Image (cartoon, rainbow, N blue to C red):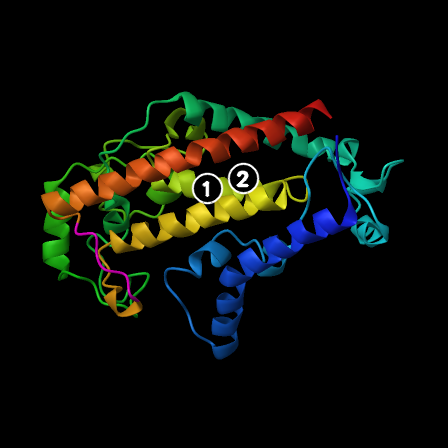
Amino acid sequence: MTILAEPEWQDRRRAHEQRVGEWTKPHRERAGRGEKHPVHDFLFEYYRFRPSWLERWHPGPDVVLQGAAAREYLRWPEYHETEHGIGLNLPAFPPHRRESLAWMVNLLRLTTERPPQFACYGLHEWAMVYRQTPEEVRHNAWPLRFPPEELARIVEAQPVRCSHFDAFRFFTAPARPLNKLQPTRAETPAFEQRGCLHANMDLYKWAFKFAPFTPGELVADCFALARDIRETDMRASPYDFSALGFAPVRIETPEGRTEYEIQQRDFAERSQPLRTRLIAVGLRLLAG
């Protein structure tokens, strides 16, 4: 058990709020103006974890908060009062969620143990617009870097090796047969590997899925990684986001593919400590 005096945990909470505010404040300001950011809004829209929830700091399992201000945490049913202060009540973790938690821990373990693959070169985004009309393209407010026929030629000239179901499911119908793998939702644990940008981005999803039992700093660390990955993902896409300050990673060239793989390997390395921490939290919750 870790016991935090009020000044200590208040400092940690303020640091967390200031850190995530650098991400949530611009998002709220854009929303207030009715503006869309095709790169940075994704983490709030696709993952559907509200900015206000991301801003909330929670200490995580086996941490007790002291001081009168800690009683505000009792508004969440997952907290209770102990002889040392206010902390999470681990037995309050809903029994019906234990199955999904055990599934997540197993997925993260398998991803940790499986050798990473680094040869996809971000073609999943290209496969999502392959053989589409301009009206069908998801981010059609932004230009593509190539006309449709040239874009299709680039996709067809390289092996498509997407292992992530939640990327593969957005492939256009003509692009799906081009993929070397045919992942399904049920087979996710058999395909997930840490070389995949989306598998590493999803660490944010697994972190917030079990809030408030997940420490706030861990949720924020996973968001920070996901944000960096999202930028690379869109820079390597067929879209031209240079007007937003995102220079393309030109995966249609050997130099661009090398640049992409360097970043991909860096993300795989950065993901491992986060995955380890998430596994530890999951096992602690399963142990009660």
Residue at 32%, 63% (x, y): give it: 139
Q: Are marks 1 and 2 in contact (CB under 8 Å)?
A: yes
Q: Residue at x 62, y 46 (%)?
A: 216
The amino acid at mark 2 is Trp
> Which residue appears farthest toward the right when viewing the image?
83
Which residue bears the numbered disc 2?
A: 206
| Residue drawn 56% across the image and 45% down it | 219
Q: Is residue 104 visible?
A: no
Q: Label 1 crowding class (10 Å Cα cut-off): few <14, some 14-19, many 20+?
A: some
Category of crowding for the residue at label 2, using alpha-carbon neighbours closer than 10 angstroms: few (below 14), some (14–19), many (at least 20): many
State yes or no: residue 249 in magenta.
Answer: yes
Numbered badge on residue 202: 1
The quarter in which the N terminus is drawn is top right
Badge 1 marks a residue whose secondary structure is loop
In the image shown, does 170 or 252 lie closer to the viewer? 252
Q: Residue furthest bottom?
A: 33
Residue range in magenta is 245-250
Which residue is at a point 86% across and 37% down the rendered structure image? Answer: 84
Question: Is residue 56 one of those drawn in magenta?
Answer: no
Three-letter amino acid code at the position of disc 1: Asp
The picture places residue 129, in percent across and down from the top left corner, at 25, 54
